[in-house]
Image (cartoon, rainbow, N blue to C red):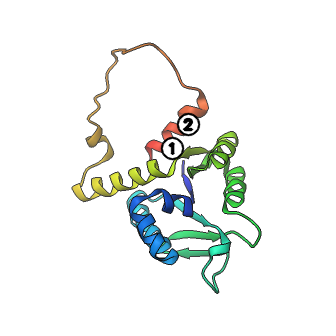
Amino acid sequence: MSIHIIIDGYNLIRQSKSLSALDRQDLQLGREALLDMLSAYKKIKRHTVTVVFDGTNAPPFSQHKDRIKGINVKFSRRGESADAVIKRMAAKLREKALVVSSDLDVIHFAGSRGSATIDSPGFEEKMSMAAYMDTKGMDGEEAVGWVPTTKKKGPDRRLSKRQRRSRVKIKKL
């Protein structure tokens, strides 16, 4: 199953230590640094990635939809927030979407529509881990060191079907 990652762009930039420093210098620098990070991540993981930014801070002469370095970039329309665009996309894609945001309203809405969610710092950590493992030539299973076994450990608490699906999507990051 293919995952479509929908990212709240300014939320991720302002939650990140490295990107927020660039964002304070110039808004365009922060956006470009984020797109560079995401394009490197996309080369490793091959997921469809869409970044949504608020249109009020859009660069002049920008379209509302664009594709930069293999990343889909959307700017919200005048009078519309990026959160509204993300919610609309999450409602449309449902189980196929993974929403990256630290905004609780967006997370709850996407989760209620069946989309998996992850907070911005958690996603940034997943991106850096993927880049690290790629430079070391490691595969995901090698890093974990898990060996299949039939031995039971702990009480038998099973997550709900929605939580299990969400966990599978996040592991694919």
Q: Position of residue 72 (x, y in %)?
A: 57, 69
Q: Mark 2 sits on what residue?
A: 165
Q: Position of residue 128 (x, y in %)?
A: 35, 55
- Please name the amino acid that badge 2 sits on: Arg
Q: Position of residue 77 (x, y in %)?
A: 73, 71
The residues tagged by marks 1 and 2 sit, at their Cα atoms, a distance apart of 6 Å
In this orientation, which residue lies closer to the viewer: 171 or 123?
123
Q: Are marks 1 and 2 in contact (CB under 8 Å)?
A: yes
**Disc number for residue 169:** 1
In this orientation, which residue lies closer to the viewer: 78 or 72?
78
* Residue occupying the point 36% across, 15% down: 153
In this orientation, which residue lies closer to the viewer: 20 or 110?
20
Residue furthest toward the right?
79
Q: How many marks?
A: 2
Under circle 2, the secondary element is helix
Q: Residues within 10 Å of mark 1 (few under 14, many from 20)?
A: many
Regarding residue 62, the answer to whether it shows in the image is yes
Q: Position of residue 74 (x, y in %)?
A: 63, 69
* Residue occupying the point 58% across, 51% down: 99
Q: Quadrant of residue 148?
A: top left
- Please name the amino acid that badge 1 sits on: Lys
